[in-house]
Image (spheres, helix red, strand yellow):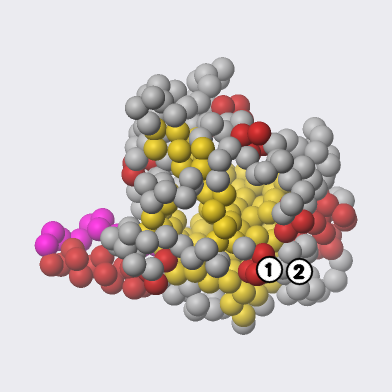
Amino acid sequence: MRGLLLALVGGCAAPGAAADSQQEHDLAHVRRASTLPQGFNRLLFGEDFSAYAAGSQPSRTKWKYDLGTSYPGGPAQWGTGEVQTYTSSTANIVITPQRTLQITPIKSSSGNWTSARIETTAAYDFACRAGGRLRVQASVKLGNNTPSRQLGIWPAVWMLGSAFRGNYWNWPTIGELDVLESINGAATAWQTLHCGPNSPGGPCNEYTGIGSNAGFTRGAWHTISLDIDRTNAGGSWRGEKVVWRIDGRAVFTVDGNRVNDQAAWTAVTRSPKFLLLNVAVGGSFPDNVANPQPGVKTPTSATLGGTGSAMEVQYVAVFGG
């Protein structure tokens, strides 16, 4: 993998055989989930979805399929107010003919929503070693239905502290890092860190979190990454940092000084983590943070499901250094 890894699949190539050839070239160019980026020497987790047959689904050995409207005994509506029911149906999660993973929200004729959410299993938990670096990286494309048709659509690539498993009421103390979230069809990606007690304010400004956003073209492939960097020469947790990148360009950085709470920073940057990929529908974030029509609940009657509201992923990998 390289710092800038952007594949415009099927974009500007000529039609016919030339377009097919260009698409295959672009896909081959980005599908190297086991290739170590500069400065990293270990592959901690790698999933290249081109290894799966079209019409199949990601391995249950690597991935747990979250189902229903909550974890067993956990907060209703996944703790965020989202309205979809998660399923393991190939209508919601499948390997495409182009051998990418596609997670698709679907609205039924009765107005009910389904989608999919998967998380890595405990065997693949990962952590940043003392004095080292850790990178989570993925190649992602978001559906390009118009914003008015995507109100409430909420794709995400993110991670949670492994201590969340089996104790679904300890958020955000266990630490959350959102590599990418995008809502309401906006050409924008949000980067966010959550930590500290489950109460307003605190070291990570809950319930909003410490975050930022950057432009993110829809309908095109982008490489997103998040680095946890513990290589600061002084050895103090205050000098450690988390850096978000889009297509190799740093778009947001948070260091220990900003959080200013050693226990919270430790949970975010040092404790074991697991990955999640999902597309939610509705909830507090699209409703309250970035809804272009304040006071309107999402999704609306105009919100569409299908591929134009889907998230597609070519690979996801975790590297250590």
Q: Position of residue 6 (x, y in %)?
A: 40, 62
Point out the stretch of residues depicted in magenta. Answer: 5-16
Instruction: Please tell me whether residue 210 is drawn above or below residue 248 in the rendered image.
Output: above
- Residue type indicated by callout 1: Phe
Q: Position of residue 267 (x, y in %)?
A: 80, 56
Would residue 69 be visible to someone looking at this image? yes
Quadrant hosting residue 307: top left
Q: Is residue 277 magenta?
A: no
Quadrant hosting residue 199: top right
Question: For numbered disc 2, what is the local secondary structure?
Answer: loop
Nearer to the camera, 21 or 159: 159
- Mark 2 against mark 1, which lies toward the viewer? 1
Q: Residue at x 57, y 58 (%)?
A: 64
Callout 2–callout 1 Cβ contact below 8 Å? no
Q: Which mark is residue 282?
A: none
Q: Position of residue 95 (x, y in %)?
A: 37, 59
Q: Which mark is residue 230?
A: 2
Q: Residue at x 34, y 27 (%)?
A: 109
Residue underneath mark 1 = 126
Instruction: Please tell me whether residue 171 is drawn above or below residue 123 in the rendered image.
Output: above
Outermost residue on the top side: it is 295
- Residue type indicated by callout 2: Arg
Nearer to the camera, 56 or 292: 56
Crowd rating for badge 1 (residues with CA inside 10 Å; few <14, some 14–19, many 20+): many
Instruction: Please tell me whether residue 316 is drawn above or below residue 163 in the rendered image.
Output: below
- Tally the marks: 2
* Quadrant of image for the C terminus: bottom right
26 vs 193, left or right, is: left
Nearer to the camera, 240 or 116: 116
